[in-house]
Image: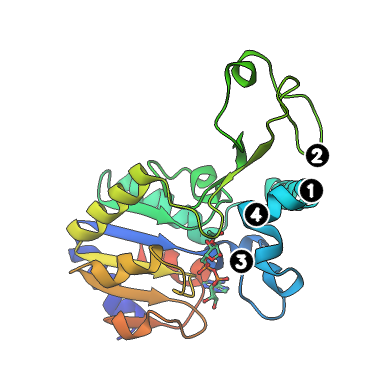
Amino acid sequence: MNADHVRGWVREARRIVLLSGAGMSAESGVPTFRDAQAGMWAKFRPEELATEQAFRARPAMVWDWYALRREMIAQVEPNAGHRAVAAFQQRHPGRLAVVTQNVDGLHQRAGSAGVLALHGNIAQEKWLDAPRACCAQHPPVDGHPPRCAVCGNLCRPAVVWFGEMLPQAELEAAEAAAAACDLMLVVGTSGVVYPAAGLARATRGRVVVVNPESTELDDAADAVLPGTAAGLLPRLLED
Ligand code: OAD
């Protein structure tokens, strides 16, 4: 199955889901998680940074690491893959739903509407513990991390950490979209993290994997296209 064949499937499909992972943003300059050479997890163990326990143990270190990522992401731009997805949605309203594991907001910045961000958004913050009246009354005081001046409750990044539940509304909407679609494009994900990867196994639609490397979801795919997001998506999604 080649890209032209898959382009035919795109044209036929009435409902499409694009399920993206870190590789979607690689050509924007955002390192992937599991790339052995450049991935962020090569330098840091995930359990040192991306868990509630780690944050409680070393809040300044974890906060600063996320702040660095946030600044880096603010400086990059959506790539041709993000733009092709958003342009397709604008030409065909309601036909393509974006479900992403990425917290970088690049689909949204490219102009995609209704993005289901399963792992949250690094640009946003929330309270670590359930906010008390004092937390809501005053803006948090600056710090690493910012905190409530009265009770000391800490701000944390609004991303999903290992061991945490996904946001329920987004997950349910993603499951419904996966159940209803006749084509799912699985782009730039290694397919090892559930429940996101399970969406590609649950759909009854055709599944197409777009990735320069093999993935854990290749066995569930009707077509595997070796290539990159920015290289292939503009071709697959052109009219
Ligand atoms: P990974 O880092 O596990 O996988 C990135 C994938 O992108 C790999 O399969 C690469 O081969 C592929 N890739 C690299 N460059 C690409 C390109 N230009 N175009 C297309 N594909 C490319 O990232 P995810 O699968 O997104 O979760 O990881 C899933 C989750 O694991 C993340 O959301 C994060 C992490 O733990 C949380 O933070 C909860």
Residue labelled with disc 4: 53
First in sequence, mark 1 or 2: give its number.
1
The answer to whether any part of residue 115 appears in the image is yes
Residue 26 has which mark?
3
> Disc 3 vs disc 1: Cβ atoms closer than 8 Å?
no
For badge 3, the amino acid type reads: Ala
In percent of width and height, residue 147 lies at 73, 30
Indicate the quadrant containing the C terminus: top left, top right, bottom left or bottom right.
bottom left
Separation (CA) of disc 3 from disc 1: 22 Å
The front one of 124 and 207 is 124
The front one of 109 and 178 is 178
Locate residue 196 relative to residue 109 in the image: left or right.
left
Give the crowd class for mark 1: few <14, some 14-19, many >=20 residues within 10 Å.
few
The answer as to whether callout 3 falls within 8 Å of ligand 1 is yes
In percent of width and height, residue 164 lies at 49, 54
At 70% across and 70% down in the image, what residue appears?
Answer: 45
In percent of width and height, residue 210 lies at 42, 75
Farthest residue in the top direction?
A: 137
Residue labelled with disc 2: 144
For badge 1, the amino acid type reads: Asp
Separation (CA) of disc 4 from disc 2: 17 Å
Residue 64 has which mark?
1
The quarter of the picture where residue 234 lies is bottom left
First in sequence, mark 2 or 3: give its number.
3
Circle 3 or circle 4, nearest the eye: 4
Separation (CA) of disc 1 from disc 2: 7 Å
